[in-house]
Each structure stands twice: as C-alpha cells, then as structure tokens.
Amino acid sequence: MNILIMVLLAFFLDLLLGDPHSWPHPVKLIGHLIAWLKKCFNRPNYSSRKKKWLGALTWLITVGGSGLITYIVMKVATVNYYLYMIVGTYLSYTCISARQLAIEAEKIMKSLKQNNLKKARQQVGMIVGRDTNQLSAEEVTKATIETVAENTSDGVIAPLFFLVIGGPVLGIMYKAINTLDSMIGYQNEKFRAFGEVSARIDDIANYVPARITWLLLIISSWLLRDDTREAIAVGERDCEKHLSPNSAFSEAVVAGALHLQLGGPHYYFGELVKKPYIGNDHLVIAANWHLKRTITMLYLTSFLGLCGFELIRFLIVWK
C-alpha cells in the first residue's frame, strides 16, 4: 500500500509544482554523470567496437549506480515511517514530468502567439533533439506536438508503470535508462556505436508502456470527441513508422485524432535523418489549437494511466 500512496501523492505533487529548476533532482545528477562518462569514454580515436563496450559500461554504471543509491537511500529512510514516505514520495515525484512538459509546451505556444519565432525555436530546442534554428512556425508547432505525444509515454505513463511495479528504485532506474537514450542514443556518426546499448535497452524498457499509452490516448481522443476512428486507423497503420520501435505509437494516435501529418526528415547535429511521415495529409496547418489539444490529451491520458495502474496494483496487493 505504501507504493500506491507514494505514487498517488507524487502524481498530484507533479501537477501542482512541475519541476522547479532550483530544486535538487536525481535526473540532473544522472545527466551530469552521463555527460562526464561520455567525455571520458566516447573519444573520436576509439574504434567502434571499443565504443560499444564503453557504452555498455556507461549504461551499467549509470543505471546500476542510480538503482543502488536509491535503494540505499530508501533503506536508510526506513528508520522512520514518515521519513520513508516523504523520501519515497519525493523520489517518485521526480520521475514524473507531466506538468513540466505542459509548461514547456505552453511557453512555446505563447512565443508563437506573439510571433516571436526566434524565441520559439530556442525553446523547442530545449525539449527536442533535432536542429531547430531553421524551423518554420508550423515546424516548431509540429516538433512540440511530437515531443508532447512521445513524452506522454516516456515522461508519464512509463514512469508510472515502473513506479507502481517497483517503487522509487525501479522508477529512478527507468529515468536513468531514458536519460541515457536522450543523451547518447542518437543514430549519427558520433553516438551510433557508443549509444547503441542505451538505445536498445530503452526500446525494451518502453515496449509495454508505449503500447499502453497508445490505448490510453485512443480512449482520451474518444472522451474529448476528437476523430477516434482516424486515431485508431492511423495508430494501427503508422505505429511502427519510426526509427524507434516505440516513439510512433503515441505520435500516430495524436496525428490521427487531430488530422495532422507529423514526422518526416529532420536535421540532427547538422546531419539529415530521413524519417517516414506519420498521419494522413489533410493539408491542415498545425496551429496553437492542436498543441493545446495535445496538452489536454497528455493530462487526460496521464490521469487514466494513474487510475488504471493504481487499481491493478491495489487488486493484486488486496488479494
């Protein structure tokens, strides 16, 4: 029951606070560790084989270390029940990023509304991996929609999934896996070998959560009275049209529900990466309304996921 209470409190704490930048955050520490390991291990003069092994070591140090430290912290906190619950709730809260994702998207939406494209490009560059300095207003909007859709899985449903299964320890380990993928899991010359292990394990970790998110987004589109039929059709047809085996699941449903065409080729670190298009071309120009609706779908899907996971865990524990 403790885990159920922790996750429930963590979810509403996230909705209330988001992620204040000045607060201590495990993911920041994980990010600093990855950056240091990347600097030490991913050197241009190393062979691809050596980079792969060092990339695997980077994964082991980061994920194993994150899990071990979290376990020790939680073990120490058991000296007092209330301390245990406070620490566990806080660590669980740092795994969920629904509110902060919405905040970042709303900032971009505001800049576009003010016709400040330069600022919007800078802001979207903070939450996507692609090059953003040449994006049009519509491309900025689509990039933000894609990120909100994808991170509905990576940033909310997947963390909730692992938190409900294994509490803060498994939740933090998942965040380490996800952060590794976002920092070194690129399919370009610099990171292809070094980030291969991180990218593949992230794909495995997100396999089930991505498909749960797919279903929850369809339910959300029905509750919001969007085009659920096209959400299902595009969701089934285009769910694997991505270099990642999971990312297109949520993007495809959102694209179908909102009659948008997402995806397509993008530049990453100056290198063109060709990606297939997701969704039907209705000649609809992506606008702030579509972004606002995607944020609404994020919140509704997150709430449905929380209720579903909590209920299943409760029934299992109750038995």
Image (cartoon, rainbow, N blue to C red):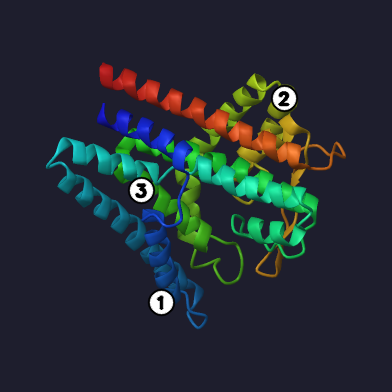
SS class, disc 1:
helix
Location of mark 3 (residue) = 172
Location of mark 2 (residue): 226
Marks 1 and 3: CB-CB under 8 Å? no
Task: Check disc 1 and give the amino acid type.
Answer: Cys
Q: Residue furthest bottom?
A: 45
Q: Rounded to the nearest whole Å, what is the CA distance between mark 3 and mark 2? A: 35 Å
Dot placed on the residue nearer the N-terminal end, 3 or 2:
3
* Location of residue 51 with respect to 313 vertically, above or below: below
Depicted 31 relative to depicted 304: above or below: below
Give the left or right position of residue 63, taking residue 297 as reference. Answer: left
Amino acid carrying label 3: it is Ile
246 or 118: which is nearer to us?
118
Q: What amino acid type is highlighted by mark number 2?
A: Asp
Question: Residue placed at 12% from the left, 42% from the top?
Answer: 79
How far is the residue under mark 1 from the one under mark 3?
Answer: 24 Å
Q: Is residue 59 above or below residue 276?
A: below
**Which percent across, then down, holds residue 87?**
26, 44
Q: Which mark is residue 40?
A: 1
